[in-house]
Image (cartoon, helix red, strand yellow):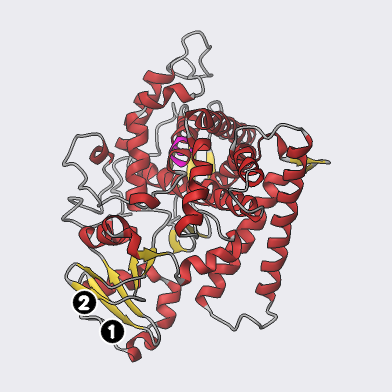
Amino acid sequence: MLDAPGPLPRDMLRDLLGIRRDPLAYLRGAVQRWGDHVAFPLPTTPVLFVNTVAGARRVLVENAGAWSKRTVQYGALSLVTGSGLLTSDGSAWREARRVAQPAFHRSGLTAVAEQSVAAAERLRARWDAAGGGPGGAGGVVDVDAAALQATLEVVGRTLFGGDVTAEGVDDGERVVAAVLEALGVVVSRARTPVPGWLPTPSRRRLRRANRVMDEVVERVVARRRATGELGEDLLGLLLAAVDEGRLPPEAVRGELVTMVIAGHETVASCLTWTLHLLARHPEAQERLHAELDAVLADPAAPGAAGAATAALRPPTWEDLRALPWTRAVVDESLRLYPPAWVVTRRADADDVVDGVAVPAGTLVIVSPWLLQRRADAHPDPERFDPGRFTGEGPAVPRGAYLPFGAGARLCIGRDFALTEAVLVLAALLRDRAVHPAPGHEPELEALVTLRPRHGLLLRLVPRTAPPPPAERGRPAPPP
């Protein structure tokens, strides 16, 4: 028994539909009713929800070796990724991390930067064709769909390099589509558990998606090996490790699929909510535009029709350090809408978390979405304030910000994701602005990442066009 308050078994049964429909609202309600430590009465496993900075730090950093990823959450994800960096533990995880780490050093991130800007430029071209460019009148766009498309292109071209096409088939897009299909099945099955042996339609969809991933990775590996040069990107590093006996052959598939999830689904979520927050907070967006004007000014380029300033060039890797406000906007968006909204660990040994005795086998749940909204760590926590990350306000306490996890298991793709998000945002908004779409309020949905149910519509307008009168001074709703 855990020495913490919580619901009775009959309460859990009564609330089951609400938990499936909106787990974030349920967790927030549980904290409001029972406090920062809530014991949930599952029949076979003690479950403790922890909503303190110190408690999260104990589990994820200070005593991380006593806590594993042998949980339902990661077990479900492993049906898609296999034993990849996202789901593995122990020596297998450490060796895979050592192998993959060089791909995320500066040389690898410059390629991410190039592909991020290129994907944003292709998206801009599609917007121009639809009348949303600097010379057009603007229009309503689904920025969630746009973010998914842009990040799909980045991850496909970056992870698979020159190996993304075969006989006119885009393998990068095929494997991303298969990953999304499989993740959808995993979420659905987690919400409505059924025996694994039942031949359900979702089980068949999962097998089909996994078969596509297997085929694409096998083809990509064969093409790379046929060149006689493995290369120094992620794929090349993985293949070299297999040849040296450091990794099993199946690890190549697992790590590539893991990076597809990390570089596509999570970054798309970040970009979608960042654009939403900028649309709701025009003063933050104006400051972002001022930064882009200063950094990306290209006096040699002719100004766009009707533009008040010279055209702005696309951003590059070298511009990242000169875009602190753009980066702070992304950081604050990740505080309010962390894509990885829940983290789970299982105690491999007895521990004490915030004074609560936790026996071995206990499942602990931490929600960055709730933890990063604590008023004692983030004053006025519901307010969108990128200044928290520029030194203009109180420093964010250590351990109170963990959209990429913490400690030794800090996400290996953090810099990949931040490079991609900042440069895509800068490229998209350098001569455009986003405003709320009349009558549209996004609905938050907690899936593998935080997504807007039914998309997220915003008005895309040329920078020189003022917002409609009804939107000027419009109070921003809480995120």
The quarter in which the N terminus is drawn is bottom left
Q: What kind of residue is marked 1?
A: Pro
Q: What kind of residue is marked 2?
A: Trp
Label 1, secondary structure: give it: loop
Q: Quadrant of residue 443?
A: bottom left
Residue 181, image x, y percentages: 64, 61
Residue 137 against residue 48 in the figure, above or below: above
Please name the residue shown 63% across and 50% down the image: 252
Q: CA distance from mark 2 to mark 1?
A: 8 Å
What count of labels does the image hold? 2
Q: Which residues are magenta?
A: 417-421
Label number found at residue 7 = 1
Label number found at residue 380 = none
Please name the residue shown 28% across and 40% down the image: 386
| Along the viewing direction, whichever of 29 and 321 lies nearer the viewer | 321
Cβ atoms at labels 2 and 1 below 8 Å apart: yes
| Along the viewing direction, whichever of 2 and 268 lies nearer the viewer | 2
- Give the dominant element type of the magenta stretch: helix, strand or loop: helix
The mark nearer the N terminus, 2 or 1, is: 1
Label number found at residue 34 = 2
